[in-house]
Amino acid sequence: MTHEILAALALLMVHIWLLPMILNLSNATWLLGNRDDPVEFSVLTQRAKRAAANFMETAPVFLTLAILASIQQVDVAELAMYWLGLRVVYLILYVAGVAYIRSLVWIAALVVLAMMAMALM
């Protein structure tokens, strides 16, 4: 489970730092400065930030389940990889502006978290 936990943390960094930075390079001076003045974000950057907020709602649950699985020596690595894959797809769909399929992917990721939890019982 170590690899899956590290992958989830890497995905967290993509969500909260890397993708918003890449999509907001036109505001490099603001990014490198004190950020005292408000800046206008592109639609893609705003979507990436909303996707990051959504990720922050489920990542703690995933990490908790993954750590518990490691402690209890329950193999949920395959489920963890499904969750990670679904979250990557979710991010891509969110930034691309795909609404309904994105929601189905989110539900699938939630089901995978429930399956991980049930495996620990």
Image: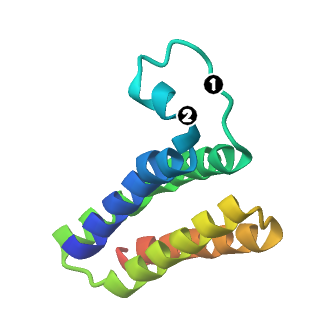
Q: Nearer the viewer, residue 50 or 35?
A: 35
21, above or below 14, in the image: above
Please give the name of the residue rendered at 68% of the width and 51% of the height, measured from the top-left corner: 44
Label 2, label 1: how many angstroms apart (C-alpha)? 8 Å
Amino acid type at image mark 2: Asn
Q: Position of residue 38 (x, y in %)?
A: 62, 18
Please give the name of the residue rendered at 40% of the width and 81% of the height, measured from the top-left corner: 81
94, above or below 32, in the image: below
Q: Position of residue 73 (x, y in %)?
A: 19, 78
Q: Position of residue 26 (x, y in %)?
A: 57, 40
Q: Which residue is mark 1?
A: 39
Looking at the rendered image, the quarter that the C terminus falls into is: bottom left
Please give the name of the residue rendered at 48% of the width and 34% of the height, measured from the top-left corner: 28
26 sits left or right of 56 in the view: right
Q: Nearer the viewer, residue 63 or 116?
A: 63
Please give the name of the residue rendered at 54% of the width and 49% of the height, measured from the top-left corner: 52
Q: Nearer the viewer, residue 62 or 39?
A: 39
Is there a contact, CB below 8 Å, between mark 2 and mark 1? yes
Q: Which residue is mark 2?
A: 27
